[in-house]
Image (cartoon, rainbow, N blue to C red):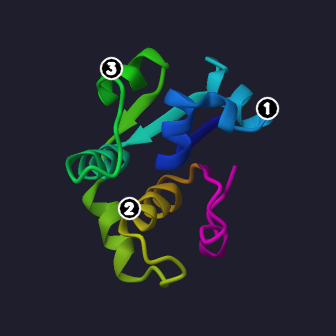
Amino acid sequence: MTFLLDTSILLWALAEPDRLDDARRQLVEDRSNTVYVSSVNAAEIAIKVSIGKLTLDGELLSLADEAGFDWIDFTPGEAMLLRSLPFHHRDPFDRMLVCQSLFRGIPLMTDDTNIAPYGCNVV
């Protein structure tokens, strides 16, 4: 299975895996799955760390690499989807992750109930 992690799920997977239900934790930890994390996640985490809303034990890039996650960049094609994306959700980072999910046709693992109305596949 292939899927993209939203930022909360990424942080839980790296620092608090017990916050994930068993099914999601198994999916994230199964090395036969392709687990994507995004430059969008990195930007959101960097901003939250810089303003003191979040602390992270370790360096995000190496932690994600050690977990076996694959990085993807936010592309101009994905950014163009933002023009027509309805405002079911106001968080710009979540909206960008939705665009990546829709553009690439990959599911998004999230607990955010505001994501489903976009029609992307939610894990």
Of label 3 and label 2, which has the lower sequence position?
3
In the image, which residues are magenta? Answer: 107-123
Of label 3 and label 1, which has the lower sequence position?
1
Along the horizontal axis of the image, is 71 left or right of 104? Answer: left
* Label 1–label 2 contact, CB within 8 A: no
User: Quarter of the image holding residue 28?
Assistant: top right
The residue beneath circle 2 is: 93
Of label 1 and label 2, which has the lower sequence position?
1
Q: Quadrant of the N terminus?
A: top right
What amino acid type is highlighted by mark number 1? Asp
Q: Nearer the viewer, residue 80 or 15?
A: 15
Crowd class of label 1 (few under 14; some 14 to 19; many from 20; radius 10 Å): few
User: Quarter of the image holding residue 75?
Assistant: bottom left
The residue beneath circle 1 is: 22
Along the horizontal axis of the image, is 56 left or right of 94? Answer: left
User: Residue drawn 38% across and 61% down?
Assistant: 93
Badge number at residue 62 = 3
Q: Is residue 6 visible?
A: no
What secondary structure is found at the residue carrying circle 2? helix
Measured Cα–Cα span from mark 3 to mark 1: 24 Å
x, y percent for residue 64: 41, 26
What amino acid type is highlighted by mark number 3? Ser
User: Quarter of the image holding residue 46?
Assistant: top left
56 is higher (above) or lower (below) than 5 = above
x, y percent for residue 12: 55, 37
x, y percent for residue 96: 39, 62
89 in the magenta segment: no
User: Residue drawn 67% across and 57% down?
Assistant: 121
Measured Cα–Cα span from mark 1 to mark 2: 26 Å
